[in-house]
Amino acid sequence: MDILLQEVENFYKEGKQFHITNRGSVTEGEFQGKYLTIGEEKIVDFTRLDYLALGSDPNIHQIMSGAIQEMDISCPASQMVMQSSLNRKLEESVADLHGTEGALFFTSGYSVNENIMQALGLRGRTPLLLSYVKEMHLFNSTKNAPTIFFIDTNSHYSLTHGIKIASHLSKQSLCCSHIFATGDYEKLETLLEKAKSKFGDNAVKIIVSDTLDSANGRVSDIKSLYDISKKHNCYLYLDESHAIGALGPQGSGITGEQLAQEKDRSNLMIMGTFTKVFAQLGGYVTFSPAEMSYYLRFCSPQYIFSAPIPPWMMVVIIKTMELLRGTFGEERREMLKNKSAIMRNKLQNVGFDTLGSTTHIVPVLIGDEDLCYKLRNFLLEKGFLVANFQYPAVPRNQAILRFSICVDITEEEIEQIVSVLMEGRDKFYSSKENTCVAFE
């Protein structure tokens, strides 16, 4: 106990210089959607992820209010114990959105990624299930086939974390991973060729990538990844967290946009969340064939032991998805596209580097971590909350400010925050020794 308390005390003291234990590094206020109230000040929130502003939409409020009034609001048991008709309907709705045959959902997007990576990495070798698997003689024909992940270097931590857990728990090195830099598909194909020469067809191969980078707004070349996955007979797992509902036909994300002409989706696994555009809890993964749901459920510890999102929330998500797939969603997505373009153009016109973003995630490259932190606080003092990303979330000296654009942000507010950002640039980078990326 003394060692832990000493460690806590040292961490608290030492962490201040990196802005990780300062109370000022986390904004405290009353959350009210677009606005935060801090003391008596109303702050415009550019960090929230409710991209289509459904959290304040009266249509969604009415749907939610009706569901709460009509239904029991408690959580049922694990989905391995009981699945309601709503479970099935939600799975079918999500699978239909992505043109796949089956789906599973969890209580968060992080849970989806971590658990599905473990399930695929360990397969029938999940420690919890080993005695049962042996007794029932399951997986005998494939038990020595390894799982090999090929991971885009910018993939979300939840993915790499799940893969690391699977690799650690796997015996006889039956789960391993290789990293390729974003866009370096020559390296990816080289890694796949090496796996082929070593294991032949006796391996489960899975390419893993985000479709939309949550920090810099970069869109991945999903069509190229799809073609490579087909060529090398492997699965393609895509994290669509920041794109679902906000981009693509009917809100089907970047996969829906780039693979609109591809009817064969038998090797695709598409992950999304309900916590952003849908303004609810939970996340999901879709796949084909539908029978894979039994396999993934069996191999996922959280699915077995954890409760699902409550049924009333399933109703809200299903009805919200119907809205987003129609004209309501089309109009909101067009508004988001226009607002995002206005923000990017205004920033670029006054010399800020937005790192090539073409989406509603608009970064500004600052560079120096301490200066990025100061700029973030300067913006907060002026009435705007933005997210600052610094090492280890991004490489050293590549700190950024991230602006999350939502449809209810006005052009006037965009004009104001760009003006304040310019004022901060002049304030902090006026001397040559303080020059950084944002000033060059």
Image (cartoon, rainbow, N blue to C red):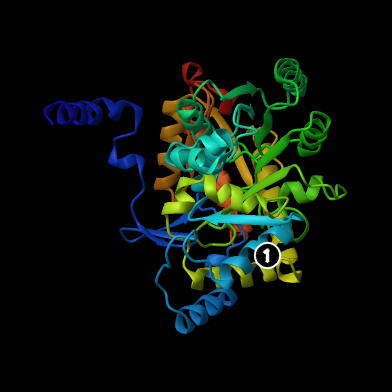
What's the residue type where badge 1 is placed? Ser
Residue 232, quarter of the rendered image: top right
- Please give left or right for residue 68 compared with residue 286 in the image: left
Side of 260 relative to 143 (left or right): right
Query: Which residue is outermost to the left?
Result: 2
Image quarter in which the N terminus is found: top left
Which quarter of the image is occupied by the C terminus?
top right
Splitting the image into 4 quarters, where does residue 306 fall? bottom left
Q: Residue sitting at 35 percent across and 39 percent down?
A: 25
Residue 236 shows in this picture? yes
Near mark 1 (Cα within 10 A), the count class, few <14, some 14-19 or many ≥20, is some
- Secondary element under disc 1, as helix, strand or loop, is helix
Q: Is residue 349 visible?
A: no
Above or below, 301 against 440 in this view is below
Give x and y (percent) for residue 39.
30, 58
In front of the other: 359 or 307? 307
Q: Residue at x 85, y 47 (%)?
A: 262
- Up-down: is 376 above or below 391? below
Residue 169 is situated, as x and y percent measured from the top left of the image, at: 45, 29
Q: Compared to 89, does 412 lie above or below?
A: above
In the displayed structure, 417 sits above or below 425; it is below
User: How many tags in the picture?
Assistant: 1
| Residue 82 on image: x %, y % | 49, 66
Residue 125 x, y percent position in the rendering: 51, 35
Q: Quick check: 428 left or right of 331? A: left
Front-lying residue, 329 or 233: 233
- Which residue is labeled 1 in the image? 93
Q: Is residue 310 toward the left or the right of residue 39 in the image?
A: right
